[in-house]
Structures are given as C-alpha cells and as structure tokens.
Image (cartoon, rainbow, N blue to C red):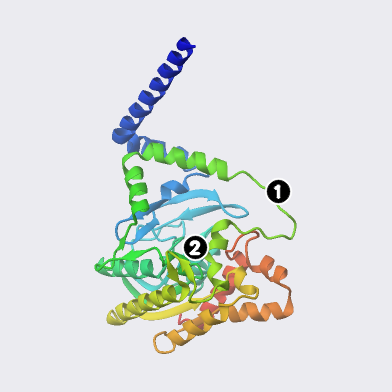
Amino acid sequence: MKFLFLKIKILLNVILYTFFILLILDFFLGKKILDYLDSYLVKTEFYEKRVRIPSKYFHHHLKPNLNYQMQGFNKKIKLCTNNYGFKSSCIKNREIKKFEYGFIGDSFTEGIGLNYEDTFVGIFEKNTNKHVANLGVTSYAPKIYLSKINYYLNQGIEFGHIVIFLDISDYYDEAYYILNKKKNIDHEKKSKIQIFFRKNFPFTNYYIYVLRSLKSNKKKEPVKNVINFNISALKKTKWLNKNLNEKFENNKTTLEIHNEIKKTLDEIYELLKKNNIKFSLAIYPWPQNLTKNKNTKFYQEEWKEFCLSRCDYFFNFFNFFEEELKKQNYLEVYKKYYFWNDIHFNESGNRLIANELLKKLPR
C-alpha cells in the first residue's frame, strides 16, 4: 500500500511539474505558437475565440482584417472585418475615414450567423452605395455605444448619421458595464482576470475554451414545433414580465436600468449634436415580445417619447410584427423571420429591417 501511495505521489508531482513547465512555455511562447497555428485554427469552428478580443476603451470588439469561414445557424458563412474591426464585405476596400452612415447595436446589428451581405446593414449598404460602418458587436449595450462612438470620433473618423439599434437585452447588459469619466468602459474584476489569463497564457486559454465548447456543443435532439431558447436568452428577457420597481439585475430595478439607458442615450445624442452628426433610434422585438407580457408596451412608448425631441428618425419595428400576428399565428411568424431555437432574425428578418431603412433614410 505504501508503495502504491508513493507511485501516486510521483505521478502527481510529474503532472504538476509538467503543467508548470507548460505554463512557463505558454507565457513566453504561447502567442507565437497560436500565431503560427493561425492558418490551421482559422479552419475550425473554435476560431471565434481568436476573433472577439478585449478593448481597453470599449470593452470588446472584433479583430481587424478578418476573413474566415465559420458555421452560421444553418450554413457555412464568411466573417470579414475591415481595418477598424467593423463587420464588412469580404471584398476589401481602401481605408475609409468618412462614413455616411454608422449602425451600432449588439448581435442583431452585427448580424451573427449571417454573411455580411445578408445582414440588414449589408443590404442597406449595397442598395445605397454609401460608405457604411457596422459598429455593432455581440453583447454591446448603450454605455459601449457611447464609448465606441466617442473613441472613433477622437480617432478622426467621421460619421454623417448614427443609427442606434436598441435591444431588449440591453437592460441586462447595461446593468454591468461601468463607464468612467473618460467615456471608456472599465472591465469588471472577473473580466480583468480573464484578460490577464488570455494575455499571459494565450495557448492554455485557447484550448480550455476549445474543451468547454466541445462539452457544450453536444447536439440535443430537436423537438418538432417546440422552441428551446438558451438560458442566456431567457435570463436577459426576464424583465419583460417583472414589475418595473422589482430588482432585475446587479441589484438594480428595471426602472433604474431604464433611466441609466436614457441618460446614456442622451449623452450620445449630445455628443453627436456637438459633432453635427444626425441621430436615429430603432427598436425591434425579440420572439419573447410577440407573446403577452407586462413591459413591451412600456418599452415602445418610452423610446417613442424619448425620440420626439432628439431623433431624426424613429423606427419601431414592433408595429410590423404586430400586424403580422393578426394574419398568422405566433409560430408561423417566428419561423418566417427568426432562426429556429434562437432569438435572432434570419435572412427574411434582416431584409424586412433593411427595406424599412431604405424607405426612410436619405440615400
């Protein structure tokens, strides 16, 4: 028995020392190893860890000058970015410093799961022949919108018109982002630890991500005509059925977060006004808004009122879906405009948004 314990102890020591040696190698050589392997990793479904990177100014963004193939919701797609890290066409244009339009929002505006040409921003750009910037990235919220717009204005980038696509999930994300006096986003403690690990042990960090992804990507058998939204989608829309004065997230009530968002959008409006940039606002429904809940009407009325004295254009896409629900049932509308088992617009949903923008915005 004593001999067995000795063998286990030796084995554990070997594993521990090996781990520390690998961490030391990772610290000095990890970035070089990943950069060397980049052309191979880009062909895998796990490359997204390499393309969504932290920013010390506006929390996170897409890596500049991307061109890689990934799995969308129902087909392979290409994710490309320009030299600023804005999602764009894969056909590279010259460096542009003046954009007639800038669209900013979260994953809906980024157009995750779709080629740029199938997103509403891409469709709008193609049909206007204007220089268009897609500043949207997954998990953005108004404090990041303010920070990112302010950053690029300070870099000498010009915009003629900014259109903000406010998202239902912004009420969740806004509760956690911290905007400092310089209009930069301060990373929370957990995020700082993740950035430290990613920066100093990039190789280990990447492969921990791969292992986690393999575990979470195990396919579940789909249930016909039953929508299974993920936990995040359910968590971020809880406020729709809560009382406004009830605690929602990060020890804040929905009403407190709503007022924070109003204050942030007001700052964006003042910043744009100071720089002679037009300002418009768009709101649109998640699938959860298409069923009965307490706060969808509140959301629409509040942002319509906010826009009366500030916005060049106000786009309320809820109206279209409410009309559709008079003609078809919920499931039919959902299947037509959203990806199955997801909250994002499909190609048809993006075309709908683009067509309304094209009708109203000057070309």
Residue furthest to the bottom in view is 309
Number of dots carrying numbers: 2
Residue 44: tell me if it is visible.
no
Q: Is residue 289 visible?
A: yes
Q: Tell whether 69 sits left or right of 222.
A: left
Task: Indicate the position of residue 331 as horizontal and vertical percent values.
Answer: 71, 68
User: Where residue 221 is drawn, which disc sits there?
Assistant: 1
**Which amino acid type is marked by label 1?**
Glu
Residue closest to the eye, 243 or 110? 243
Q: Secondary structure at mark 1?
A: loop
Query: Which residue is at the front of the view, 266 or 349?
Result: 266
Label ID, residue 107 = 2
Relative side of 110 to 223, left or right: left
| Residue at 42% in and 41% down | 206
Considering the numbered disc 2 on the image, is that residue within a helix, a strand or a loop? helix
Residue 299: give x, y in percent of width and height. 52, 79
Q: Position of residue 159 (x, y in %)?
A: 34, 74
Where is residue 317 drawn, in percent x and y?
A: 56, 78
Type of residue at label 2? Answer: Ser
The disc at residue 337 is none
Pick whichever, 243 or 151, lies toward us: 243
Specify the farthest residue to the front. Answer: 1
Q: Nearer the viewer, mark 1 or mark 2?
A: 1
Q: Is residue 174 above or below residue 90?
A: below
Sequence-first disc among 1 and 2: 2
